[in-house]
Image (cartoon, rainbow, N blue to C red):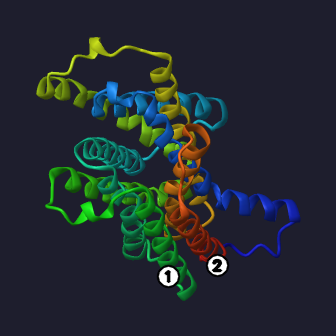
Amino acid sequence: MPRLSSKPVWSRLSTYLFALAPLAAAALWGGLYVVSKWGFDAVPPLTLAFLRVAVGAAALLVVVRATAPRRRFSRRDLLGFAALGVAVAASLATQFLGTALTTASQGSLVTVLTPVFTILLGVSVLGERLSGRLVVGIVTAIVGTVVVLSGQYDLAELTGSATVGIGMLLVASATWAVYTVFGKPLIERYSALETATYSCAVAVPILGALVPVEVAMTGASLRAIEPTPELVVAVLYLGLLGTAAAWYLWYKGMEYVDASVVSAFFFAQPVVGALFGAAVLGESPGSRFVLGGAVMAAGIYMVSTTRTTA
């Protein structure tokens, strides 16, 4: 974590809390597991991804218009926002399609591999240095995550034959890592809010253009989608909390710590999902959840208390 000793107590506390913002983002993403039980199967994957970013971008643009100063962006920065938008659109599209084409256990690959890709890019692109404590913390969090997932899913399915869906999940993990790492310079020049907003806005027309392609290739009928209360709540959760709030919180943490540190909070997603499932759906997490959650928490604590150069 950043050195805090020279700052007033409130300033130190606020800095620490903002550095933990990605943990709140992971918690919001964990809630998607429960929300998905409320009717996502009624909406084609790419159409759902489009609705998600459209709602999220609209909310973010309202906040930016009200709070951020007027900017004149250089061509390089405009291209940077565009590149982030392409990356996050690719991540969402491949994640939604990959999830539709795979089992739940195979879908958990995103949770485990995204931080790994982020760390590799953070070291190679941003020149971040991995301390011994950081490496041990990340490895510990990975072990805890695998234990949690093994209690939720049949991980033996991961050894099956490769599928297009698994390939898409790998692309989803890699492109989210690109979105995380390459957003760092723009966050430092502007803010987490502006970077999340403009990249999300760019993703809207990209995913929107894929909707008619999906309809043509699958024969899906958008008119057949019934806007039930559950589906409306699900889309609003995805857009307002899973996108607008979560993407801002994810980037907010990067104003204070390295991408390698931020990535470790991604491991908390399945734990939060299991807790939501237990609280809302009455599911039983099991003993592996308790053990794995404790190990993961220890790893995340080690990472979050590691001093970095940020």
Query: Of all residues shown, which one is farthest toward the right?
Result: 9
- In this image, 32 relative to 102: left or right? right
Residue that label 1 marks:
135
Choose between 134 and 64: the one closer to the eye.
134
Mark toward the start of the polypeptide (2 vs 1): 1
Quadrant assignment, res 182: bottom left
Residue 285 can be seen in this image: yes
Dot 1: element = helix
Which of the image's four quarters has the C terminus? bottom right
Q: Residue at x 33, y 48 (%)?
A: 91
Question: In the drawing, does residue 110 fall left or right of residue 101?
Answer: right
Q: Secondary structure at mark 2?
A: loop
Q: Nearer the viewer, residue 31 or 149?
A: 149
Which residue type does callout 2 highlight? Arg
Can the viewer see residue 72 in this picture?
no
> Compared with residue 186, is residue 119 higher up or lower down, i.e. above or below?
below
On the image, the x and y values in percent for residue 150 come to: 41, 64
- Give the label, 2 or 1, closer to the camera: 1
x and y percent of residue 287 in the render? 55, 64
| Contact? badges 2 and 1 (CB < 8 Å) | no
Q: Residue at x 66, y 35 (%)?
A: 67
Is 206 situated left or right of 1 in this image?
left
Q: Residues within 10 Å of mark 2 (few under 14, many from 20)?
A: some
Q: Quadrant of the N terminus?
A: bottom right
Q: Report which residue position mark 2 lands on.
A: 307
- In the image, is 238 to the left or to the right of 6? left
Q: Position of residue 234 (x, y in %)?
A: 48, 29
The image's mark for residue 190 is none
What amino acid is found at the position of numbered circle 1 in the picture?
Val
